[in-house]
Amino acid sequence: MIRTRFAPSPTGWLHVGGLRTALYAYLIAKKQGGQFLVRIEDTDRERFVETGTLNILKSLSWAGVVPDEGVVLDAGGKITQKGDLGPYIQSERLAIYKKYAAELLDKKSAYYCFCTSERLEELRKQQELNKLPGGYDGECLKNSTPEDAKKRVAAGEKHVVRLKMPKDGETVWHDLVRGEVSFKNALVDDQVLIKSDGFPTYHLAVVVDDHEMRITHVIRGEEWVSSTPKHIQLYKYFGWEMPEFAHLPLLLNPDKSKLSKRQGDVAVEDYNNKGYLPEALINFVAFLGWNPGTNKEIYSLSELVQDFSLEKVSKSGAVFNLEKLNWFNKEYLKNYSGEKLAELVPEFFVNNDFYHDFTEKLADKNFFGKILDLEKERVTTLAELPAAVKFIFKIPEYLPEILVWRKGTLDEVKIILPELKNYLENFEVGEWNEKNLEAKIKIWLESKKYSTGSVLWPLRVALSGQQNSPGPFEIAAVLGKAESLARLDLAIRKLK
RNA sequence: GGCCCCAUCGUCUAAUGGUUAGGACAUUUCGCUUUCAAUGAAAAAAUACGGGUUCGAUUCCCGUUGGGGCUACCA
């Protein structure tokens, strides 16, 4: 049984890189009928953010990457824990880490260290100066016996627990994306396992938890590669079965540095707020470092589950390219039905003044959907929709000159528009819908020997008040007869 | 500085010891068309560099360069 996990720190919001990591972990588990869990790694009290966990969980849920176990959202959207191997929040597991640290101490696989931060800083400075590799020098291991150390601890002296790395040999593992990776043990630091505040560091906590929660595949970012030997050593000391490791390439800024807030949005909620569809973000992010090896690019989450494999994940970092995300978003947007969009977009409309005058009308999802259908393939995000459809509610101010087609004349328009209005007013066009309007108006214009553009351009501008807009028939259909005629009338008055 | 990793069009990437090095986004041109969008067709665009191995390397090896990660009592 495959079990993967996503283990974020609640330091703010979910990073898009984190979303990809979570997605890959989810896909690996789901592909083989396994489980995906979320664990919260809140051992750093200094960077802890109260709302962090909720934010992360909400973003995951928005994206559709929903955990089977661990820290999850309940039906009411509240944080809860699910599963028998918890707690799944590290700050609730302190006693467990203490127990395992004691075991390590007993086995002499770890030792107490009383060095001050000043001494450590000085040590680092000297190492840098002499161009030596960094890392703790083992002072407390050499200069005090375990018995002494125990006494000092009992006496209340401030201390940490350090991992005792072997000083010879090397640690090698077969990484699922990077192949064989090896480190000389002598260069691996005697990492702090328990901090002086009694909290474990990531390194102890991650190994203990992944073991206890029966994680089979550790999928995480490349930044963890160099600490993996420490983790492997811990597995060896404990005598635990090792999980598979897969270190994912980083997401990059356009200048190839590690994707950061400075150069654009990195939080999943930013993309949500900007009107990107979760399907688009997921599809896009899935293709940053992975592809199926075919030309298929549009992938739903369930299709990803089918086709994803770690072997096809590339080793090099991928630039987060907004243009491509925009394309994905448009691709999904235009395939949405207007009615479905009508459910999604209200949050983007509430801040627009014109919305309030039409709340009643917009409550009719069918009508609202028709309006959205008008513009959905002309915008890239949901957030652009309100401005794009605004002309339906309130015709913009426009200059009479724009009523003239580029191949037509002002005089011509002055004749055509009143004639057309007259025709629409007095003649039976059947039901006032796009199809009928198009058929009847085209017959009319042919009978009058007018060119298509000389009639449709001014009609469209009169209806939309804009040089660029959807076609005249679709607009007229949405507007209805009365409003359409009123707008034609306005145009005619403008021309006088 | 030390350790580790990476390197194909601007970007995401495919491919192979022998290919016209393929696709997508973006760009440009043309078509369709009442405008925009959508759409159809086309163009331009890459194997970082230097050595090997080989009949042949973009592919395998070494080096150089470039980029990145780590180098915390942060994750």
Image (spheres, rainbow, N blue to C red):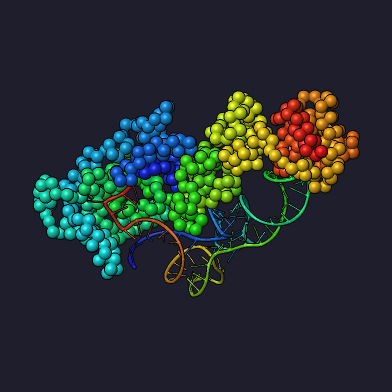
Q: Quadrant of the C terminus of chain A?
A: top right
* Residue A104 spot, x, y in % from top left: 20, 47
* Residue A459 spot, x, y in % from top left: 78, 37
* Residue A375 spot, x, y in % from top left: 65, 38
* Residue B67 spot, x, y in % from top left: 45, 61
Residue at image point 89% right, 36% down? A448
**Residue A16 left/right relative to A421:** left
Give the image quarter of residue A95.
top left
**Residue A483 left/right relative to A103:** right
For residue A304, say whether it is visible.
no
Q: In this rendered view, identify the residue nearer to me: B19 or A215.
A: A215
Q: Quadrant of the N terminus of chain A?
A: top left
Q: Residue furthest front?
A: A496
Give the image quarter of residue A352.
top right
**Residue A308 left/right relative to A241:** right
Q: In this rendered view, identify the residue nearer to me: A181 or A263.
A: A263
Residue at image point 19% right, 55% down? A116
Please tell me whether residue A272 is drawn above or below residue A264 in the rendered image. above
Please tell me whether residue A94 is drawn above or below residue B52 in the rendered image. above
Give the image quarter of residue A369.
top right
Residue at image point 81% right, 42% down? A453
